[in-house]
Image: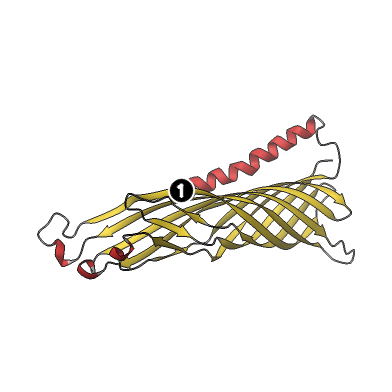
Amino acid sequence: MLQRTQNRAMWVPLALLATTANANEFGWFSDETWTASIRAGYTTNISSDGALTGPTESVYGGSPLIEMDDGYQYTFALGRELLDGLRLEFELGTIASQSSTATVLGDEARADDAFRFDADVDSTLYMVNLSFDFDLLDWWATPYLRGGLGVADNSVDASYSVDFDSPIWQGTTFEGLSLADQPFAEGNTTEFAWNVAAGFKKRLTERWALRLDYSLLDRGEAWTGPDSNGDSVQFSELKSQQLTLGIDWRFR
C-alpha cells in the first residue's frame, strides 16, 4: 500500500505542473510574478502516536501505542508575488502512507496471545501560504520564511494480527493459530492544518531557482470508524517535521 500511495503522490504535482505549463502557452499566466514550485522531502513524525480505543480494549491487555514511521511528502505550489519579496502561495500536498505497528499481549486467560495493530495514514493538504524573501545581496542564497493555513484530508486504514498461544486454546482449532493482516476499520477526517517553514532559495537562471527548507506541519487528528465491536484506532495529533528540496519555475 505504501508504494502505491507514493506513486500516486508523485503523479499529482507532475500533472499539475503540466497543466499550468499548458495554461501559460495560452497566455493565462502572462504576468511574470507567477511561479510554480515542486517540493519533495523527508517527514519525521514528532507527535503522531495512535491508540486503540473502545469497549473491548481490555481484552488486549490495555491500549497499544501505535508509533508512526517516518515517511515522505510531495507538494505542488502555485504562487504570485504581491509585493517585493512577499508571495501568496496556493499549495497542494500529500504525505505518503506511513505504516505503524503496535504489539501487545492479551489479558488474564489470553495473556499469552499477541495482538498486532497496523495503521496506514495518508494526508492530502490544501494550504494557503504567505512567504517572505530576505533578499540580502551579500548572501550566496536568499533566506525566506513561510507560514500557512488550510485543511488536511486524513485517511486511516487499520488491520490486525493475532497469535493464539494461550492455554485456553489447547485442543481447539485456534491452538497455535496465527491470523495475519485481518481488516479492522478505516475512516476519513477533514481537519484544520497549519505550517511554518524557513529555508534558502538559490536562483539558478532568470526563470529557475532551487530551494531547501525545513517546516513544521500540524494536520490535526485522524481515526478509523468503529469496527463491529465498536473499537477504533485514533491518532489524537498528527504533527511532523519536513526537510524538503524544491525547484521553482517562473512563468515568464
Left or right of 63 on screen, residue 138: right
**Residue at 33% across, 59% down:** 55
**Residue at 74% across, 32% down:** 22
Quarter residue 12 falls in: top right
- In the rendered image, residue 21, in percent from the top left (x then y), is placed at 74, 36
Quarter residue 107 falls in: bottom left
Query: Number of numbered discs present?
Result: 1
Q: Nearer the viewer, residue 1 or 93?
A: 93
Q: Amino acid at mark 1?
A: Gly
- In the rendered image, residue 16, in percent from the top left (x then y), is placed at 67, 39
Q: How is the image coloured?
A: secondary structure
Q: Residue furthest left?
A: 171
Q: Residue furthest top?
A: 26
- In the rendered image, residue 196, in percent from the top left (x then y), is placed at 70, 61
Badge 1 crowding class, 10 Å Cα cut-off, few under 14, some 14 to 19, many 20 or more, is: some
SS of the residue under disc 1: strand
Residue at the disc numbered 1: 187
**Residue at 64% across, 43% down:** 13
Left or right of 177 on screen, residue 233: right
Left or right of 128 on screen, residue 54: left
**Residue at 20% across, 68% down:** 109
Quarter holding the C terminus is top right
Q: Is residue 52 above or below residue 74?
A: below
Q: Nearer the viewer, residue 191 or 34?
A: 191
Left or right of 2 on screen, residue 17: right
- In the rendered image, residue 202, in percent from the top left (x then y), is placed at 79, 58
